[in-house]
Amino acid sequence: MVNLNMAVMWIKFAINFIRFVSIFFFIGIAMSILFYPGGNLHDPTQEGYSLSHNFLSDLGAYETSSGDVNFLSSFFFSFTLSLFSFAGVAFLFIPQIFIEDRINYYLSILGSIFIFFGCLFFSGVGLTPHDLYVEEHIFLAIYAFRFLVPATFFYAIVLFRSNIKNFYLYTILTCMLSTVLYVAYEILSGSPIDGVDELVRQVIIQKIIVLVSMFSMFFITLAFSSKLKSNMEKET
């Protein structure tokens, strides 16, 4: 009983930490935006941060396009994204929720492994300023989202096979479809260097997929909590 209670405690902590990271992301990014000096790829004279002309990665640059040292903004950006590495570890505890169904258990393990690497790469994005580590930053940013495709696929199957509200299944399916489309767009689109229109298009699409991912991350924790609660009620 003690071991069972300890396991439940760790699972609850993992769920709450993942939920915290998904919420804190918006707070940390807002703080980073607040302290961003200015400048974008095509206009170094721009004041402050533009939601339509600056990538999120601009917040983590050592030096902005305007030539200003970006200390405070990059600090909040790097700290916020570094939390995803711990969220990735937290996801490794989640399969225990589905242990009573062998198929769901193994599928959730696969999903959590892919999420772990996706979160690890997201953390790497925050720790590699794009103006100092160009190739590394691009590699991490690209594959962070690509890991989410199989991750959401496996967890979509798990939620489909579990007695969980359809809302959560539709949420993760939306995330999976959006991520697939985003990965395809990354492959087929041009370079933001080509012009302002292409820059704005890519900046907006990036923010949409990030919003979808963060909201999905939050809502899936509600699905995990619901399943854990159901498991505990069955045991009692």
Image (tube, rainbow, N blue to C red):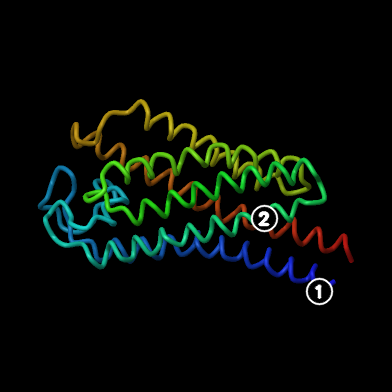
Checking the image for residue 94, the label placed there is: 2
In the image, residue 5 lies at what x, y percent? 78, 71
Say which amino acid is labelled 1: Val
Mark pair 1, 2: CA separation: 19 Å
* Residue marked by disc 1: 2
Looking at the image, which residue is at 59% across and 46% down? 113
Quadrant of res 25:
bottom left
The quadrant of the image that shows the N terminus is bottom right
Residue 198 vs 133, above or below: the answer is above
Position of the C terminus, as image quadrant, is bottom right
Please report the residue visible at 58 percent of the width from the left and 42 percent of the height from the top: 151
Q: Which of 156 and 120 is in front in this view?
A: 120
| Furthest residue toward right | 236
Mark 1 nearby-residue class (10 Å; few <14, some 14–19, many ≥20): few
Residue furthest to the top: 188
Mark nearer the viewer, 1 or 2: 1
- The answer to which of 195 and 4 lies nearer the viewer is 4
Tag of residue 201 = none
Q: Is mark 2 on a helix, strand or loop?
A: helix
Q: Determine whether the residue tagged by mark 1 lies in a helix, strand or loop.
A: helix
Label 2 Cα neighbours within 10 Å, binned few <14 / some 14-19 / many ≥20: many
Would residue 74 be found to the left or right of residue 83 on screen? left
* Residue 2 place in picture, x, y as percent: 81, 74
Whole-percent x, y for residue 95 in the image = 70, 52
Marks 1,2: beta carbons within 8 A? no
Which residue type carries mark 2?
Answer: Ile
